[in-house]
């Protein structure tokens, strides 16, 4: 167990975060933990969330239903704290999330070509979040990179790490013969930048 | 207005709420459907990454959803190129396509699967990926392979059987050819055989007549084949032959038959037997015309020579007799001794000439008999008595075993029969060393109505390798020649002819250095006329 336990005050603050998120993110979090730490691990998370006064029954979460964005951050932080996850674990969690995501599966129609995927990515964001905005300033298959930007989404730094893994997976879904994908947040609102910018590269 | 607007918003919210509930129900339904569906299904995006799998897929491949989602689809197939090509080609088809591929499970087990591909399109008709259904066909494939193996095995068996059959047919064909060749060869031999041949089948029907036989009897095979012996009797050229063979084609051996003036055939018949089955009878005709001619000329020569020799020998005999009797004056003992030796030699010469004349008469068929009803025992007594002095001189014991039962009289030429008995007794005396024994036995065989004469000696016997020639003219055993005894080698030949002329049989048993026993039988003819038939 991590030492920096969330307090009810922390939770209250987080729950006050504006915006909503699709229930699928809770499902992918739970699936990750279930696979990594065993079936009983989800119960531990649920118990901690209950203690914090925001109980979540992961089984009853509906992928396409909207839930408070703050609750999703609480869930992620509780998981991180309980299992003492490091940044690379959170990135991995983000990377694996699209695998379990019903929304991703439903949105695969936009993954027909790289161009189309890139062009349609803002819609993809809108399918998941009611706040923030995804931009696609550019990509180069020749130079082997994608750039995505997220504006107006200053929620919690843990999500920056999470998104690094998440967008890596989306790229992995598109580039069959590529390998050694890497992601880097080159700009971050928490560092004073006007947006988050994530650069994905590969070989 | 405000109220109306509020009602409108309320209505939209209600619709959204219902839509949300419907979506949630749909999600639950899809999850349950996917969970319980026994068919392994996966969704693949256009770049061919697995983006979703159901429970059955995870069970079949051994991959958890978290492991396989996001991985290229070809990860699970051994024929990767083929799998990708199959998906690419499927884009051009509207109907689902099916292909058998080998799935490689997480634990590297290879599973044959039937893969059905369906193309996913959005509501605008854009291609957005694939659905794949994987059906484990291990059992089906095993059954099919087993069936194919069985078919292959059966095909092999059939092929082996066919080969074996072909070999058999080839063997049969070879055998048939050989048989044909053998048949042709046999026919060729028969056709070109210098002897005439007739073959009768089991029903005594003529089945073959060779060209030589056709020539002998001046007949055509086409007119005779298939005819019975009875029918052949009607053919004038064959009547003599049929009379000889009889209705049942009796077995005959070297019977002579004069067909016409310049053709004499020697005829033999023998059954043709294979295993225990009788195929018919073979009749062989050997042309002995030339041999008969030579024999006749030779006999005539011998007869002439013998006659020409006998007259001066008779003159010599009587002259010597007169000298020995003193009719021509006295002679000294030394002269007598020489004259006596000369007289005996002359006697032997006369005897030889007489034998030769007998032989020529026999061969010319002029060995005339004077048949009278006689007591054969008296003939034997007479001959034994005539040799009495000689037997005593040679210190041989002779026993004549008389029968208790009376021997019936038989019709014989007494003079010739004395010659016959004399020849066998003379041989027994000559070839039995001093101290030996000669036993003469007479018997009457009631069953066959025959008189059996037997003369047994303890003499030198007859060598095994010479037994066959005993009854030939001029035969003298090698052991006898070494003994330097007298003899012309004609005695037994003459005896045999005399016995056979009386309808009897003659034979012998012998072991070299232990002696010999000669037997002959004479038939007891009840009627004189019956006897005469023989002549």
Image: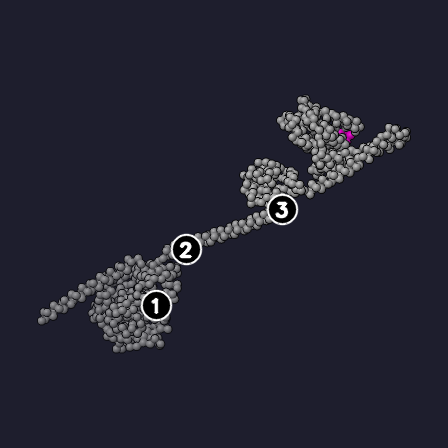
Q: In the depicted view, which residue is nearer to us: A174 or B419?
A: B419
Sequence-first tag of 3 and 2: 2
Asked if residue B435 is among those painted magenta in the image, a careful observer would answer yes
* Crowd class of label 1 (few under 14; some 14 to 19; many from 20; radius 10 Å): few
The relative height of residue B432 versus residue A185 in the rendered view (above or below) is above
Residue that carries the numbered disc 3 in the rendered image: B193
State which quarter of the image contains the N terminus of chain A.
bottom left
* Crowd class of label 2 (few under 14; some 14 to 19; many from 20; radius 10 Å): some
Residue that carries the numbered disc 1 in the rendered image: B88
Q: In the depicted view, which residue is nearer to us: B203 or B240?
A: B240
- Tell me how the rendering is colored: one colour
**Residue B67 picture quarter:** bottom left
Sequence-first tag of 2 and 1: 1
Task: Give the letter of the chain under mark 2.
Answer: B
Residue B71, x across and y down, in percent: 34, 66
State which quarter of the image contains the C terminus of chain A.
bottom left
**Residue depicted at 76% across the width and 33% down the height:** B431
Relative horizontal placement of residue A72, taking residue B528 as reference (left or right): left
Q: Can the viewer see residue B164 in this picture? A: no
Q: In the depicted view, which residue is nearer to us: A98 or B16?
A: B16
**Residue depicted at 27% across the width and 77% down the height:** A193
The relative height of residue B181 versus residue B279 in the rendered view (above or below) is below
Same-chain status of marks 3 and 2: yes
Q: CA distance from mark 3 to mark 2?
A: 64 Å
Residue that carries the numbered disc 2 in the rendered image: B148
Asked if residue B418 is among those painted magenta in the image, a careful observer would answer no
Q: Give the structural element (helix, strand or loop) at label 3.
A: loop
> Principal SS element in the magenta part?
loop
């Amino acid at each position: 167990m991590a030492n920096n336990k969330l307090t009810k005050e922390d939770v209250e603050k987080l729950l006050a975060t504006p915006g909503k998120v699709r229930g699928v993110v809770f499902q992918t979090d739970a699936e990750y933990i279930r696979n990594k730490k065993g079936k009983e691990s989800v119960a531990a998370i649920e118990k901690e969330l209950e203690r914090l006064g925001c109980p979540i029954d992961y089984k009853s979460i509906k992928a396409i239903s909207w839930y408070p964005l703050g609750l999703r951050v609480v869930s992620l932080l509780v998981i991180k704290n309980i299992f003492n996850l490091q940044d690379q674990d959170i990135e991995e969690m983000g990377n694996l999330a699209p695998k379990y995501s019903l929304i991703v599966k439903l949105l695969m129609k936009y993954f027909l070509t790289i161009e189309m995927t890139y062009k349609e990515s803002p819609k993809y964001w809108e399918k998941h979040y009611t706040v923030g905005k995804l931009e696609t300033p550019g990509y180069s298959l020749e130079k082997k990179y994608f750039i995505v930007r997220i504006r107006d989404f200053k929620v919690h730094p843990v999500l920056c790490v999470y998104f690094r893994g998440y967008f890596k997976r989306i790229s992995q879904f598109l580039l069959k013969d590529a390998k050694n994908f890497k992601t880097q947040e080159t700009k971050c609102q928490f560092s004073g930048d006007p947006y988050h910018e994530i650069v994905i590269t590969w070989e | 207005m405000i109220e109306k607007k509020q009602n409108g918003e309320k209505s939209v919210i209600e619709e959204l709420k219902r839509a949300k509930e419907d979506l949630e129900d749909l999600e639950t339904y899809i999850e349950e459907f996917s969970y319980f569906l026994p068919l392994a299904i996966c969704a693949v995006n256009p770049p061919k990454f697995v983006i979703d799998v159901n429970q059955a897929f995870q069970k079949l491949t051994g991959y958890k959803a978290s492991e396989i989602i996001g991985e290229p689809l070809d990860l699970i197939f051994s024929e990767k190129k083929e799998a990708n090509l199959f998906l690419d080609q499927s884009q051009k088809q509207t109907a689902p396509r099916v292909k058998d591929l080998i799935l490689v499970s997480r634990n590297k087990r290879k599973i044959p699967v039937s893969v059905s591909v369906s193309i996913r399109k959005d509501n605008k008709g854009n291609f957005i990926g694939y659905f794949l259904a994987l059906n484990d066909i291990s059992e089906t494939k095993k059954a099919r392979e087993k069936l194919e193996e069985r078919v292959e095995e059966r095909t092999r068996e059939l092929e082996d059987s066919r080969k074996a059959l072909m070999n058999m047919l080839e063997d049969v064909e070879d055998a048939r050819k050989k048989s044909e060749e053998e048949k042709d060869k046999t026919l060729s031999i028969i056709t070109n055989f210098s002897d005439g041949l007739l073959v009768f089948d089991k029903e005594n029907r003529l089945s073959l007549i060779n060209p030589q036989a056709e020539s002998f009897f001046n007949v055509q095979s086409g007119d005779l084949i298939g005819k019975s012996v009875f029918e052949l009797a009607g053919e004038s050229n064959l009547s003599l032959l049929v009379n000889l063979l009889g209705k049942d084609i009796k077995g005959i051996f070297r019977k002579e038959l004069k067909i016409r003036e310049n053709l004499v055939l020697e005829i033999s018949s023998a059954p043709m037997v294979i295993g225990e089955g009788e195929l018919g009878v073979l009749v062989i005709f050997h042309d002995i015309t030339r041999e008969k001619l030579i024999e006749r000329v030779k006999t005539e020569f011998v007869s002439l020579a013998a006659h020409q020799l006998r007259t001066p020998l008779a003159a010599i005999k009587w002259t010597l007799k007169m000298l020995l009797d003193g009719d021509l004056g006295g002679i000294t003992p030394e002269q007598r001794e020489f004259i006596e030796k000369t007289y005996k030699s002359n006697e032997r010469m006369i005897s030889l000439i007489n034998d030769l004349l007998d032989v020529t008469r026999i061969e010319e068929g002029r060995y005339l008999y004077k048949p009278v009803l006689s007591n054969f025992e008296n003939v034997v007594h007479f001959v034994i008595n005539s040799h009495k002095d000689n037997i005593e001189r040679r210190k041989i014991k002779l026993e004549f075993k008389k029968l208790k039962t009376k021997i019936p009289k038989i019709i014989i030429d007494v003079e010739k029969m004395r010659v016959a008995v004399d020849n066998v007794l003379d041989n027994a005396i000559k070839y039995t060393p001093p101290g030996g024994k000669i036993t003469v036995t007479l018997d009457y065989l009631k069953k066959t109505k025959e008189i059996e004469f037997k003369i047994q000696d303890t003499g030198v016997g007859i060598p095994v390798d010479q037994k066959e020639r005993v009854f030939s003219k001029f035969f003298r055993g090698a052991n006898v020649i070494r003994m330097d005894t007298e003899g012309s080698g004609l005695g037994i030949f003459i005896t045999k002819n005399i016995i056979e002329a009386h309808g009897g049989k003659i034979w012998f048993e012998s072991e070299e250095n232990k002696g010999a026993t000669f037997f002959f039988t004479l038939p007891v003819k009840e009627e004189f006329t019956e006897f005469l038939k023989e002549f």
